[in-house]
Each structure stands twice: as structure tokens, then as C-alpha cells.
Amino acid sequence: MEQKRLATGFFKNSFYQFLFSIISHFGGVVFTILIARILNPELFGTYTLTLSIVLTLMTLGGLGINEAVIMYISSNYKNKKKVRAYFIYFFKIKIIISLFLSLILILLSRIIASFYNQKSMSVILIFGALYLFFYSLMQFISCLFYAFKNVKAYVYKEFVFQAIRLSLIPFLIIFSVGFLVEGTFMLSVIGSIIAAFFSIIYLFKKYRLFFNQTGGQINKKEVFNFMKYLSFSSLSLLFLVYTDILILGKFVDPEFVGFYKTVSSVVLLAASLLMFNPILSPIFTQINKRRTKNTLNILLYYLFIFSIPITIGLIIFGSYFIKLLFGAAYLPSVLPLYSLVLLVIFLPAEELFRSLFVAKKESKIVAKIISISAIVDIILNFALIYYFLRFGAIYAAFAAGITTVFSKFIVFFMLAKASKSRFNIKIKPSIIIKPAIASLIMGGFLIVFTKVIFKNPNLLIVILEIILAIGIYFLSLYLIKGISKKETNYIKKIIYEVIKNKSFINSKES
């Protein structure tokens, strides 16, 4: 009975997590597309570089705080006083760090702009500092939704944020002439403030008992020991995530940074649809070692079932989608796309393992692995970008993509290896081979359809082709016993239970 509730809760929250990914990344990609078209490649490159600097500091200021909040509150959710005490403790830390980093960014804005030989960036960085503070605050407050396993509320928050900044884009065009990049950051600042207020109001109405309780006692020493490895992991992670753009921006003109950003946003959109680590952390926290092994094996298998064919599809349709979404001016970004596309496979798999180790309070292992990968990433980025630059700036962007994928693969491989010794989790070759075979069959169909039957397809033909390709893929997977009838019926049953149950969270827990 407990297993059934867990499965039902997971699939219910998985549905909302998928919906969140659609809203968050679809909204993010639409925002990126519109801004890219408004700014042109050069200004968009400047915006991307500034945003990467801001997000680097944001990651630095994260220190694993949001993950710690989710972990400690979800594992103590029955003790409302303790939950409130943990939240207040982490909230104070978050405010101090975010404010400090925002002020540092403002003070160093001229030095950073001079380093990248872009004087106009100094003013843009000040607006970026505002974005750093308010977006960090919004994300911290709303992470309580994950801790309470109320992913639906997180979806609402994200919808508010994306809707606000998208709806304000016409005002950017009208009132920000000459200050388009600065105005772009202000759209996100306004969206963050409104979404933060929405989150507070929702939490107060839904979890009023949480606000009414006085703070209890917490083990700060235990929190510190847990946080120090997450903090170290975050410090390493910031180099691993944003090194490519920060180094690339030093060697090439802004428009090539813009080209790199366009394809990375498309790839990350595809990868994000397969990442469920925020809802997995509370589940991994509460299940035993045997069930952890079974759960992770199943999740990995279904991850590869979707990630491998999506990767093949992006390779074949990459240039078409770039031209359709961003315009012909961004077609040079097709080359970096080919180097980044494997992130669709490795990024969700790596995040799956990382959430497992953090939930099991093994963040020390994650910190060591990410640190090693970050060092490799920095060295390779400098070496490959500098080497490929002799062939042209777009090849330098291609090299940055190779480095990013390789670094993520290292993290995935080492975490998988560590999980084998720590949790006795083994990745069976069949969970990769069967989806790969079905994907190659699908890819063959797409190549024949695109290159032979319709050499210049329009949008309707592409949509039809994608629908047929999906059907061929799953039929092939079924025929090679990649999906059994038993599994299909089980998924139908779980979906029925999810629809039937009105709420995953018991009202008493609220």
C-alpha cells in the first residue's frame, strides 16, 4: 500500500514537474527567441555574457541552500516548529549572501566590463545585480513548495513569473530604445518580485500553520557539516556550468556568444523536460536502500527511452528549428548545436544521480566529483577554444560545446561508478542499447523522409514527420521488447490513480 502511494505521488508530481518544465523552459525559450530577435546577434551576445556573469554569482551564492531547505524540511515536515526554525535559519543566510553578491557585482561592474572590452556592460551589470538579488529570493521562497511536495504550486509560481516578463516585452520595445539590454533585465526583475509575492501569499493561505508556529531547536552543527560539502559542490558547479560562455566571451566577438546561447537554450529545453530531481529528493530521502536501487534503475531506463530519440531528432532537425525560431541571422549556430546535443542524455542522468547522493546526505562525494570535473572543464575550455579559434570564431563556440558535454559526461560516469559501490546500483547495458536501436531506426526514417521524399519541408510537413517518427520509434521499441505490455498497463494504472486522487498532500500535513 505504501509503495502504491509512493508511486501515485511520484507520478502525480512528475506530471506537475513536466508541466513546470514546459512552462519554465518554453517560457524561457520564447523569451530568449523574442529578445534575440529584438536585440540582434551582437546585443544578444552582450546580454548573454552579462547574464552568465550574474548566474555565476547566483550559483556561488546558492551554496546548496535551496537543496538543504528541501532536504531538511521534507525530512522533518511533521514537526512544524522545527520546519519553521530551519526555514528562518536558511532565509537569513540567503538574504545576507544575495545582498552581498549584488553589491560586489555593482562595485566591480567597471572592472568586469573593461576585462571583456565592453564599456557599455558596466551599466548593464548594475541591472543584472538587481536581477541576482530578486530572482534568488524568489527561488528560495518557492523551494518550500518542493519541500512540502506541492509541485503544483511551484507550477503556478513559474507561470506567474514567465507570464509577467513575456507580457512586458512590448513595453521593452516602446520605452527602452537605446537601453534594450538593461530593459531586458528589468523585465525579469519585475517578474521575480511579483512571483515572490505570489509565493508568499500562497504559502500563507495553504500552510498557515507553518507561519503561526514559533521556531524550534535545530542541529546547526549537522546543518553545517551537510552544507559545507554542498557549498564546495556549488563553488565547483559554477565553474562547470558557466565556464564555457565566460571564457568564450573573452576570445570572440559578442555575436558568437549569442550564437552559442541560442543553441544551448534549445538543448537545455529538451534536457529540462527529462529532469525531475527536485521532486525526487524528498522521495529518495524517505525510501530504503533496496527501493532506492529499484527506483533509480527504472528512472534511468525511462530517461534513456526519451533522451536518446530526442538527441537524434535535434541532430536531424537542428538547422530547420534554428532558422524557424531565431531567424536566418542565427544559422551559424548550427555547428555548436552538434557539439552540445549530447547534453540531452548526460545532463538529466547526471542530475538524477546527484539528487540521489544529496538526498542520502552523501554530498561529500558529489562535491569531490564536481570539483574534479570543474578543473577538467576549465583547462579544456581554455585549450580547445584557443586551439579551434584559428579556424574561426564559430569553431571556438563548437569547442566550448565539446568541453561542456565532456565535463558533464565525467560527472555522470563518476557518480554512476560511486553509486555502484555505495548503493549497489548497476546500469544494465540493455537500458541504453534498446532505446539506441529504436532511435537509429527512427533516425533512418527521418533521413529518408527529409532528404528523399521532402527535400524542402514546410512546418506542416515537419510536424507530420515528427508524429510519424514518434510512432515508428515506440513501435520499434515495443517489437524489440524495450517496453512490455505489463509496463504499459502499469503506467496506465498509475495515471488513472493520479487522476482519481485529488491531492497528493494530506490536508493534515498542510
Image: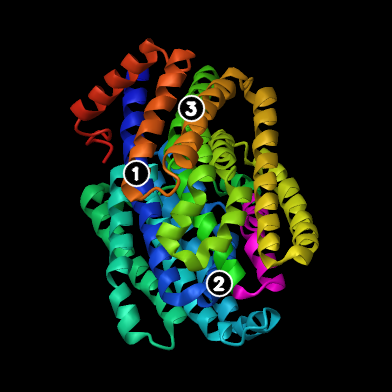
User: Residue 1 vs residue 227: left or right?
Assistant: left
Which percent across, then down, holds residue 350? 59, 39
Which percent across, then down, holds residue 459? 34, 50
Q: Which amino acid type is shown beneath numbered disc 3?
A: Leu
Spatial CA span between label 1 and label 2? 33 Å
Q: Which amino acid type is shown beneath numbered disc 1?
A: Ile
Residue 72 visible within the image = no
- Mark 3 or mark 1, which is nearer the start of the sequence? 3
Spatial CA span between label 1 and label 3? 33 Å
Instruction: Give residue 45's mark.
Output: 2
Q: Which residues are magenta?
A: 231-254
Q: Which amino acid type is shown beneath numbered disc 2?
A: Gly
Give the secondary structure at mark 2: helix
* Residue closest to the eye, 423 or 32: 32
Above or below, comparing residue 198 to residue 402 in the picture: below
Instruction: Give residue 299's mark.
Output: 3
- Residue in the picture at 38% in, 57% down: 141
